[in-house]
Image (cartoon, rainbow, N blue to C red):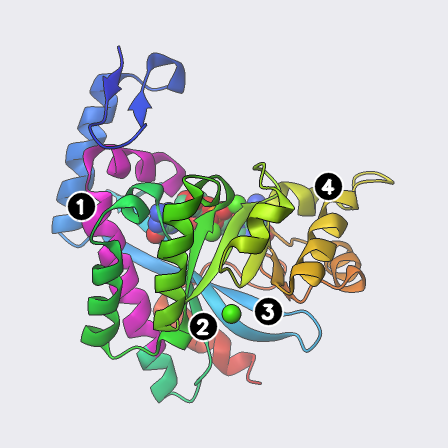
């Protein structure tokens, strides 16, 4: 059984694990949860590894279904398939924008929030106008917003992508390439794209301490960032050894359980009080 999506290349097949009826059930439950405001956004601090201060946070979507947390890794594909991701993604962006405005009022002027953008959202013809409208509605500073697109998205349709990234950058919003190192981007392609930051995938951060050559991919990404004048952030930093090695390699930013878990808006406030710059 394979259902093809009209616009995208997304489909479900039995090989993906849970069966169709379970997916359809989850699709209905997700829509209901969204309408009944059972979804919320958490924020995981992003740290300047040298000064050990928080410079921003990544917005991550949460769904608590009757006391049970459902992972976004499971429900985001369903939101993409059903098209709900368009509304959902806009809502997450809006929450993040409002959060930057709130933080600014509390004195965190340059605190940046990164938002994950799905490929379905990104390909939507109204994406740019939605972004601009949300920025103006919420009065968020574009300089406080970063969009994370995945490396595989960054490899598609180079001309259309280059144009879109230029338009986004013109608004003042930054772009990061998420899960970097897992795709196949060439240096020459990357050089042409208007991006600000590379995010080293957690898999390569984990590898750092696993073997003698374990840090070689992280090292190559950090070097690439240096050569192309892009910032680099490591995700999934869990221990001091990883942080020390990343720091020594010249990685500027880190995010992971070592520093902080994803936090609710209130928890973030408290955390920032305790980790005041
Ligand atoms: P991601 O963008 O790669 O996000 C990083 C994931 O790693 C998050 O999982 C985060 O909670 C987790 N993480 C952070 N620090 C650590 C650590 O030190 N160790 C380990 N083991 N994990 C860590 P989460 O929140 O479950 O999100 C999973 C994925 O779901 C995200 O991967 C992202 O692709 C997607 N996602 C989450 N929220 C959104 C959203 O609002 N929109 C879209 N389109 N996708 C989202
Ligand atoms: Ca991400
Ligand atoms: Ca990742
Ligand atoms: Ca820039």
Q: Would you say 18 lies left or right of 153 here?
A: left
Q: Regarding mark 4 in the picture, which secondary structure is present there? A: helix
180 versus 255 height, above or below = above
The spot of residue 178 in percent (x, y) is 51, 50
Q: Earlier in the sequence, mark 1 or mark 2?
A: 1
Tag 1–tag 2 contact (CB < 8 Å):
no
Q: Residues within 10 Å of mark 1 (few under 14, many from 20)?
A: some
**Bounds of the magenta span?**
72-100
The residue carrying mark 4 is: 207
Marks 3 and 1, the one that precedes in the sequence: 1
For residue 112, the mark is 2
Q: Residue at x 42, y 68 (%)?
A: 113
Callout 2: few (<14), some (14-19), or many (20+) C-alpha neighbours within 10 Å? many
Left or right relative to 44: residue 219? right
Q: Which residue is mark 1?
A: 33
Mark toward the start of the polypeptide (4 vs 3): 3
Q: Looking at the picture, how far across and down is residue 253, in whole percent?
A: 63, 65
Q: Nearer the viewer, residue 117 or 7?
A: 7
Residue at 26% x, 63% y: name it. Answer: 131
Q: Which residue is mark 3?
A: 47
């Amino acid at each position: 059984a394979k259902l093809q999506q009209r616009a995208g290349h997304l489909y479900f097949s039995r090989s993906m694990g849970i069966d169709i009826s379970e997916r359809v059930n989850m699709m209905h439950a997700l829509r209901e949860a969204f309408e009944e405001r059972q979804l919320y956004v958490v924020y995981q601090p992003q740290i300047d590894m040298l000064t050990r201060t928080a410079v921003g946070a990544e917005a991550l979507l949460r769904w608590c279904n009757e006391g049970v947390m459902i992972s976004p890794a499971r429900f985001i594909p369903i939101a993409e398939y059903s098209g709900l991701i368009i509304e959902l993604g806009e809502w997450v962006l809006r929450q993040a924008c409002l959060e930057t405005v709130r933080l600014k009022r509390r004195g965190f002027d340059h605190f940046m929030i990164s938002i994950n953008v799905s490929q379905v959202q990104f390909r939507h013809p109204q994406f740019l106008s939605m972004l601009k409208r949300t920025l103006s509605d919420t009065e968020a500073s574009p300089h406080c917003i970063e969009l994370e697109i995945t490396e595989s998205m960054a490899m598609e349709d180079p001309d259309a992508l280059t144009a879109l990234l230029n338009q986004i950058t013109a608004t003042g919003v930054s772009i990061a390439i998420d899960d970097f190192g897992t795709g196949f981007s060439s240096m020459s392609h990357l050089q042409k794209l208007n991006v600000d930051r590379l995010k080293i995938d957690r898999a390569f951060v984990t590898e750092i301490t696993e073997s003698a050559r374990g840090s070689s991919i992280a090292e190559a990404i950090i070097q690439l960032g240096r050569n192309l004048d892009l910032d680099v952030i490591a995700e999934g930093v869990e221990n001091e050894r990883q942080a020390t090695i990343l720091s020594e390699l010249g990685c500027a930013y880190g995010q992971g359980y070592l520093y902080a878990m994803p936090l609710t808006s209130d928890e973030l406030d408290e955390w920032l009080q305790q980790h005041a710059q």
